[in-house]
Image: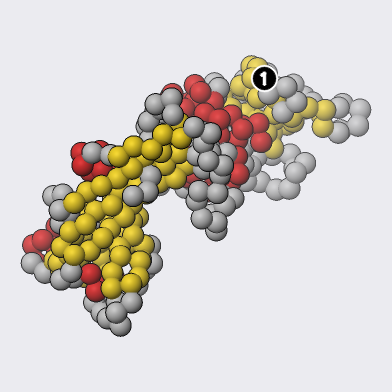
Amino acid sequence: MRAHLGDQLVIESPATGAARRDGEIVGLHHEDGTPPYDVRWSDTDEVTLVFPGPDAHVRHLDHGPPGTDTSEAQPASEAAPQAGAPNPGDVGRRVAVERRRRGLSRGEAARRARMSPDYLAYLEEHPADPTVATLIRLADALGTTVSALRGAGVDTPPGQGHALLHPHLRDLTPEECRALLSTHGVGRIAVTTPDGRPAIFPVNYEIVDDDIVFRTAPGSAAAAAVGTDAAFEVDHMDDASSQGWSVLAVGPASAVTETAAVRRLVQHAHTAPWAGGKREMWVAIRPVRLTGRRITPADGQAAMGH
């Protein structure tokens, strides 16, 4: 018998063959995936060390419909993606993003979620289908919701949660604003289009030498910011805790045309524009005014509007 982290161990009735008990394999004791296993049982949510008997089989996440016996599946070392090429699923990506957003190491997040750090690493780096109980513990540890980890609400605007009973709104210092802008992300550029109408567009941005830079296409609406005093806004809302912040940067926008400067921006860009297409014009905003606000509970817990 061989298993991978995240597989399901099923114990069947010797008489009927029906499943009597099942659980998620959250810990391996041998690199080749052979027993024993640490199993989190679905009926009690407890983790126990299990030496499977003849009435047990492994149900692999990626093999066949429920009930398929995959006891002879590939060992974990053979089935895993090649080193350097992890292939996380959507749940794993969201878990990793939320963990990093809160500044938690894998070890600390695993401790809070009461699971093995190896299992958390598996969830973040491979397609997986964790149990509801596992998602509940992860959501609690990361200060979010099971629905959010599953991707619910991706088509709804943030900020639909209830307001705090006693919110605390405070202004951010320029230093705090710079820290929140960080190195890169998605922000919004406000421009006046050639027809004289105001417009706001989301763009992938980078911070380079204190400038806010983004890529667009020549002649695009976002390119209209060049030669003007532009406004650029970044924010984050946490519906789960009804907290958030926003930063507004205002300053002159210019096109980056010097060859060496453009090459440097391309080489150090963290991501390509999400919108796709040919966007090779770099625009830089040099902030001359940075303002921001943050909403937290009135008891002073840290981490909006203007």
User: Where does the image place residue 218, in percent across and percent down from the top left?
Assistant: 24, 77
User: Where does the image place residue 107, in percent across and percent down from the top left?
Assistant: 43, 24
Q: Residues within 10 Å of mark 1 (few under 14, many from 20)?
A: few
- Residue that appears at 26% across and 65% down: 215
Q: Amino acid at mark 1?
A: Glu
Q: Which residue is mark 1?
A: 46
Name the quadrant of the N terminus: top right
User: Where does the image place residue 127, in percent across and percent down from the top left?
Assistant: 54, 45
Position above or below: 208 against 131: below
Position above or below: 144 against 201: above
Residue 31 visible in the shown view: no
Please tell me in which quadrant of the rendered image residue 299 appears. Answer: top left
Left or right: 71, with 76 as reference point = right
Left or right: 186, with 38 as reference point = left
Residue 242 visible in the shown view: yes
Q: Residue furthest right?
A: 15
- Residue that appears at 86% across and 33% down: 18
Front residue of 202/299: it is 299
- Residue that appears at 21% across and 42% down: 174
Left or right: 201, with 283 as reference point = right
Question: Element at badge 1?
Answer: loop
Front residue of 65/172: it is 172
